[in-house]
Image (spheres, rainbow, N blue to C red):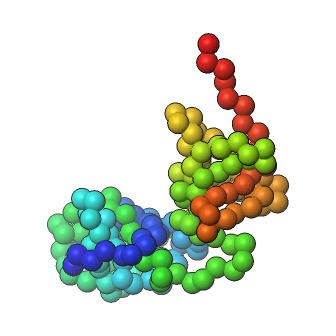
């Protein structure tokens, strides 16, 4: 079942086992939660390698999701998948409207402010409830910037690998 997606987009994680027939509990990062069940095949990252699994069935269960993957027919095999990231190939996702981006498209962009100061690289985004937050790595420092378009996010240039933000960064003097 080894097969590599050309551009993997992480949508969730195998969170546990469910029953004895190979079902797994799924932690979805999609909105709404059940959208992850709309995609197949899934690619699970096992020991740094992607393995392709067809999603046979999936459903809500209690406050989460459970799924059955093709070829995963016992609890031991399901247990071996716990902790694996679940991805789909980027080509499986719908196109975004202008000004809308998948988080995976933003990760890796270089961020600079309006003064041209390089703030670092986007490492991840966090959902905080009020608004999403960019986590930017700058050497040993992390900069957290609310993802609020037209307030802090000025311009996204995917083709140039860059984001411009209205954010001041004052580096501490090293004495």
Quadrant placement of the C terminus: top right
What is the quadrant of residue 41 in the picture? bottom left
Q: Relative to 169, is 157 above or below?
A: below
Q: Is residue 147 left or right of residue 109?
A: right
Residue at 51% x, 77% y: name it.
Answer: 34
- Residue at the extreme right of the image, as rendered: 151
Residue at 82% x, 60% y: name it.
Answer: 150
Query: How far across and down, in percent of the image, does residue 166 sit?
Result: 79, 49
Question: In this rendering, does residue 89 appear at all?
Answer: yes
Q: Is residue 22 left or right of residue 127?
A: left
Question: In this rendering, does residue 64 appear at all?
Answer: no
Query: How far across and down, in percent of the image, does residue 138 sit?
Result: 57, 39
Q: Relative to 97, is 154 above or below?
A: above
Which of 35/25 is in front? 35
Q: Is residue 174 left or right of residue 61?
A: right
Q: Relative to 46, is 96 above or below?
A: below
């Amino acid at each position: 079942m080894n097969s590599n997606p050309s551009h993997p987009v992480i949508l969730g994680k195998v969170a546990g086992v469910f029953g004895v027939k190979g079902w797994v509990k799924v932690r979805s990062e999609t909105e709404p939660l059940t959208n992850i069940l709309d995609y197949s095949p899934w690619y699970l990252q096992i020991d740094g390698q992607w393995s392709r699994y067809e999603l046979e069935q999936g459903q809500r269960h209690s406050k989460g999701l459970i799924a059955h993957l093709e070829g995963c027919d016992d609890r031991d095999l399901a247990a071996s998948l716990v902790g694996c990231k679940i991805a789909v190939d980027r080509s499986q996702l719908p196109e975004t409207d202008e000004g809308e981006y998948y988080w995976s498209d933003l990760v890796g962009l270089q961020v600079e402010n309006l003064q041209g100061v390089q703030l670092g690289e986007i490492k991840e985004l966090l959902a905080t409830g009020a608004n999403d937050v960019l986590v930017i790595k700058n050497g040993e420092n992390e900069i957290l910037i609310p993802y609020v378009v037209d307030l802090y996010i000025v311009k996204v240039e995917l083709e140039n690998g860059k984001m411009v933000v209205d954010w001041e960064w004052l580096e501490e003097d090293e004495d």
